Amino acid sequence: MIKWIAGRLNCLRGKHERSNKRARKPDGADHYESVCSYCGVPMQRLGKRNWVVKQRP
């Protein structure tokens, strides 16, 4: 419970943690996508261990 609260506080500060279970490579894409473990915001992989919040179109 404490870890979840700390994770949500990090989300409010803009520091998201990607979900290992939900990382995937979309069909025909050259990048991986995932979501934040705590708030569900979409994330995109820039490089190894380098994930950022995915920009909305």
Image (cartoon, rainbow, N blue to C red):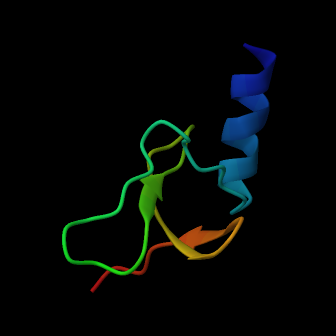
- Between residue 57 and residue 49, name the one nearer to us: 49
Quarter of the figure with residue 52 = bottom right
Residue drawn at 65 percent across, 55 percent down: 16
Q: Position of residue 50 (x, y in %)?
A: 69, 71
- Between residue 29 and residue 55, name the one nearer to us: 29
Residue drawn at 55 percent across, 39 percent down: 37
In the rendered view, tell whether residue 34 sits above or below residue 39: below
In the rendered view, tell whether residue 42 sits above or below residue 29: above
Residue positioned most to the top: 1
Quarter of the figure with residue 48 = bottom right
In the rendered view, tell whether residue 7 sits above or below residue 3: below
In the image: residue 2, left or right of residue 27: right
Residue positioned most to the bottom: 57
In the rendered view, tell whether residue 48 sits above or below residue 30: above
On-image quarter of the N terminus: top right
- Between residue 42 and residue 12, name the one nearer to us: 42
In the image: residue 30, left or right of residue 28: right
Mark count: 0
On-image quarter of the C terminus: bottom left
Q: Position of residue 49 (x, y in %)?
A: 72, 65
Residue drawn at 45 percent across, 50 percent down: 23
Residue drawn at 68 percent across, 63 percent down: 14
Q: Position of residue 29 (x, y in %)?
A: 28, 78
Q: Position of residue 22 (x, y in %)?
A: 42, 42
